Every structure is written in C-alpha cells, then in structure tokens.
Image (cartoon, rainbow, N blue to C red):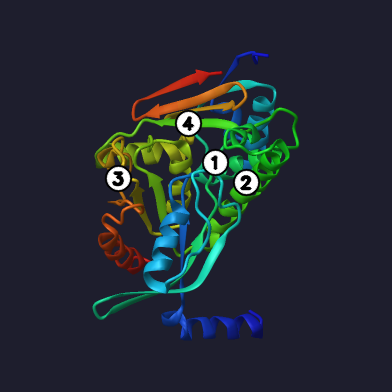
Amino acid sequence: MKEKFSLSLMPYGEIAELGSAERIKKILNLVLAGKVIVLQGQLKSEEESRLIEDTMALIGHVKGFKGIELAVLENKEEGFGAKFKNGMARVLIGQRNALTVIGPANVVKEIKRNPKKIEVLLK
Amino acid sequence: MGIFSFTKKIFSKLFKGKKKIKLGFYGPPNAGKTSLANRICEDWLGEDLGKASNIPHETRTVQFKEEVIIKKGSKELNFKLVDTPGIATKIDYEDFLKFGMGKSEAQKRAKEATHGVIEAIKWLDDMDAVVVVLDSSQNPYSQVNITIIGNLAARNVPVLIAANKIDLRKSDLRKVEAAFPEYDVIGISVKDGTNMEEFYESLFKLVKKVK
C-alpha cells in the first residue's frame, strides 16, 4: 500500500527554545506520524548525529519504521564579511540560514542534495 | 582535585609524547572503509583486519588493530586503527533480501547494523584523527557525510577525506573536492592500489595536526 504524503512546515521559532533532546523528540514524533518536515534552519551537528542514533534505536521497535531521509541546504556565502555576518546572526538568532528536510524512509525514497537545491523523491 | 586525578594528570603529561594515536575510519556503508583498513594492515602487518564485501553493512561492530606502524624514510607513524560500521540514516532488512539472504538472516543483519551505527557514532568522541572514506562515484553531498565531518569539526578532530573507487568510470574526484573545500581530499582506489603511496603521505600530514 502506498504511504500517504504529508508535509509539515516548521518555522525555526518552534524549536528555538527547546533543548536538544526535545528538538529531536519533536522531529521524530512528526516523522513517526508519516510527515515530511521542512524545517527553517538546521540542527547542530551533534544533534544531527543524535537524531541518527535515536532513529537507529527505533528501527525494529516501531512497526514499519525503516529510518529517515535527511538533507540540509545551507546558504553558504563566501568571504570574511559574509562569514562574520552569518556567525553573528547564528549567535543572535540561531541557525536559521538553512533549510532542513527530514522524512520517513517508508514515504521518502531519497532526498537528493546538490550544492544549491534539494529534490525529494517519494516512494 | 583528588590525589588519584592529580597523579593521573601528572602521568598523562609525562607520557603525552608517547600517546598512541587512535585513527578512525568513518563513512557511509560500502565506501570501502574495511577494504582500506585491510589494505593498510596487509601492507604493514601482512594480515587482514576484517571481512569486506559488496553487501552493505558487512562491518557491524567496531574493529581494531592495536598497533600499526607505517614507515616513510626515517619517519615512523604508530597508531591504533579503528574501523567503524558505515553510518546510515535508514536500514531496511528487505534491502538484504536482494543479496540472497533469508528473511530472518536479513532481519538479524539489519538489527546488528542499527547497533553498529550507534556504536560508530559513540566512538566519535574517542578519535584523535579520522579518515573519512567516501565512494567518489556517489553524490558527496549526502547528509551522512556532512554530519560525520561536522561532528569531527565540532570536536577539533583532524580529518582526511579518502575518495575511494577512483577506478570507476562514474568517479568524480572534483565533485568531492568541491563539496569539502576546507579538507584535504585524496583520491584512491583500494581495489587497484592507485595513489596508496600518496595516501600514506597524507596520513603523516593528518597525524601532525593532532593536538
């Protein structure tokens, strides 16, 4: 049976005040509900690895769950000025200058990321 | 500070220069981590480390070689080699059925593979330097690659990217270099031995960066 596709747009404000564990829990709850999340911003690298660990821990314990597809599109501007501006923005308002797409592997076949675009291929 | 931790600190300072480096091999499944680790062990120890195959998640537990010594002229590099299971974001037992496995064997393999990914991530904390092994014929922008390298950067762990399988027609070394411009990338083919000498030279440079 074909899985239903449901998209959830998540502004950064929804996770900005949460700790790492809560952020991951919120994301995984949506993914387990079959939703593909488009998150404004991105997780910290240690949160991404924690997300992978928690995903692995769920495989085999949640019926039909096979893991996630994940891709991040960063707006990487070159040059010292841009890096400084981005660094300051990250400190002041968080890591918002990116888009993260996360979806359940039983719904999303593949998320292809090339330097400047993301393609979501459904099953 | 307790007497034990004080003594430990003094001893660790005394023996800092003699500390053996833990060199990790990380990357996605099927990039050739174990094949590269085997090649190093064969070249310098005359023995294999583990079994490599074209079935994903062949390595499902962390494997070690306690002491590998590489010599280059008068220089010598002594390290503990740590080969880790491939890191993935999804594991489906049905993928293993295509390789002729029975359902229960495939499910067992999938379960072990999920544990292997968790174990590999946990080991990130213990590495002094890491060789990230990628398949140069695959898209380097996979988030698994970026997450591994991002985690190592956050821990200030020096990284060398070994872009393996340059013998394949689809291999695109420039794409790997463009994806990770801040890192040293060496194109190799473990299969036919291309650039292995250069790879060993890069290892010396990598270990020099360990603080």
The chain ID associated with circle 3 is: B
Residue B204 placement (x, y as % from top left): 31, 68
Q: Which residue is mark 4?
A: A71
Question: Is disc 3 placed on a helix, strand or loop?
Answer: loop
Please state which amino acid type lies under the numbered disc 3.
Answer: Ile
Sequence-wise, the earlier of marks 3 and 1 is 1
Q: Which residue is mark 2?
A: B113
Is the N terminus of chain B in the top left, top right, bottom left or bottom right quadrant?
A: bottom right
- Residue B62 in the figure: left or right of residue A58: left
* Quadrant the C terminus of chain B occupies: bottom left
Q: Closer to the camera: disc 4 or disc 1?
A: 1
Q: Residues within 10 Å of mark 1 (few under 14, many from 20)?
A: many
Q: Which residue is mark 3?
A: B166
Pointer 4 and pointer 3 on the same chain: no
Q: CA distance from mark 3 to mark 1?
A: 22 Å
Question: The residue tagged with tag 2: helix, strand or loop?
Answer: helix
Badge nearest the viewer, 4 or 2: 2
Chain letter belonging to callout 4: A
| Residue A16 position within the rendered picture, expressed as x and y whole percent measured from the top left | 57, 33
